[in-house]
Image: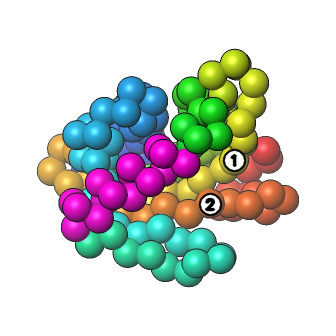
């Protein structure tokens, strides 16, 4: 049985690797951070389920094309919070900033992830945006 602090530390390491892979556009590492299937949940679109590697690759390509068309250069983690929910289950709440190639801010946001340990690897099983002014799980200040 893992201790909650060990799980939180593992989630921190996982999330930093996920953002690093996103910034490097390392498709293999990025895709490996997600369980198949996984879900995106939003107030606008409801539940979107990604059920195959092909769909996941297409989604990643669309996201990157959109970000690059708006001048994206990299994303940074501003604040990170994690909760152990069980030995194999956790939740991550992260504030992020996306920067343009000129160093200016493209956008800022907050996302909430449910993650599950699959063997030794953590995988995202659901992802949702936390829109301002809402704080999301834990009422963590922005």
Badge 1 marks a residue whose secondary structure is: strand
Q: Is residue 6 above or below residue 49?
A: above
User: Within the image, what quadrant is residue 43 found in?
Assistant: bottom right
Residue positioned 66% across, 28% down in the render: 100
The residue under the point 47% across, 44% down is 64
Q: Which segment did they paint magenta?
A: 52-66
Outermost residue, front side: 69
Q: Residue at 64% across / 40% down in the picture?
A: 70
Q: In the rendered image of this protein, does residue 93 appear above or below residue 137?
A: above
Q: Residue at x 73, y 50 (%)?
A: 140
Farthest residue toward the left? 119
The residue to which callout 1 is attached is 109
Question: Residue furthest toward the bottom?
Answer: 46
Mark 2 sits on what residue?
129
Determine if the magenta segment contains residue 35: no
Seen as rendered, the residue at the extreme right is: 133
């Amino acid at each position: 049985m893992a201790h909650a602090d060990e799980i939180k530390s593992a989630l921190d390491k996982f999330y930093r690797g996920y953002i690093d892979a996103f910034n490097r556009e390392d498709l293999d590492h990025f895709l490996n951070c997600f369980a198949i299937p996984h879900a995106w949940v939003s107030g606008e679109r409801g539940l979107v389920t990604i059920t195959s590697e092909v769909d996941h690759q297409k989604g990643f390509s669309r996201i990157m094309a959109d970000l690059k068309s708006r001048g994206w250069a990299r994303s940074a983690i501003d604040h990170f919070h994690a909760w152990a929910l069980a030995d194999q289950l956790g939740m991550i709440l992260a504030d992020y900033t996306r920067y343009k190639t000129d160093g200016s801010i493209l956008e800022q946001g907050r996302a909430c992830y449910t993650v599950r340990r699959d063997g030794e690897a953590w995988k995202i099983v659901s992802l949702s945006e936390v829109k301002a002014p809402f704080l999301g799980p834990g009422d963590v200040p922005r």
